[in-house]
Image (cartoon, rainbow, N blue to C red):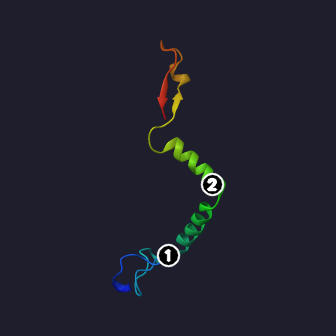
Amino acid sequence: MSAASSSVPDAHGRFGPYGGRYVPETLMHALRQFIEQYEQTQTDPEFQKQFAYYLKQYVGRPSPLCCAGSWSSGRSTTTASTWR
């Protein structure tokens, strides 16, 4: 398969010798900044710790069980729990 007919971009995001990225030129600077920040966060242990926390608390199932103290006060049940 020739480089011109390849559908996979190279390391610089280019598709063959004539193909560019599918991003408007006016957004290229912002895209480069985004890529730089993304690469920095991949090696930042504090960011990874915080990211893992949010994945555990807010993404997917099962979610942690949370006591709904304000909601259960004044009701006949002793405690009420909800899924977050």
Give the structural element (helix, strand or loop) at label 2: helix
Residue 22 percent coordinates (x, y)? 41, 74
How many residues crowd around disc 2 within 10 Å: few (fewer than 14), some, or many (20 or more)?
A: few
For residue 54, above or below residue 16: above
Residue 9 percent coordinates (x, y)? 42, 76
- Mark 2 and mark 1: Cα distance apart in space: 29 Å
- The earlier-in-sequence mark between 2 and 1 is 1
Camera-side residue of 26 and 66: 66
Residue in view at x 51 percent, y 35 percent:
64
**Residue 31 vs residue 17: left or right?**
right
Identified by mark 1, the residue type is Thr
Residue 44 position by quadrant: bottom right
Residue 18 position by quadrant: bottom left
Camera-side residue of 73 and 40: 40
Q: Mark 2 against mark 1, which lies toward the viewer?
A: 2
* Labelled pair 2, 1 in contact (Cβ < 8 Å): no
Give the structural element (helix, strand or loop) at label 1: helix
How many residues crowd around disc 1 within 10 Å: few (fewer than 14), some, or many (20 or more)?
A: few
Residue 68 percent coordinates (x, y)? 53, 25
Residue 50 percent coordinates (x, y)? 61, 49
Residue in view at x 60 percent, y 54 percent:
48
Identified by mark 2, the residue type is Phe
Q: In the image, which disc is placed on residue 64?
A: none
Q: In the image, which disc is placed on residue 47?
A: 2
**Residue 45 vs residue 74: left or right?**
right
Q: Residue furthest front?
A: 1
Which residue bears the numbered disc 1? Answer: 26
Q: Looking at the figure, which quarter contains the N terminus?
A: bottom left
Residue in view at x 45 percent, y 78 percent:
10
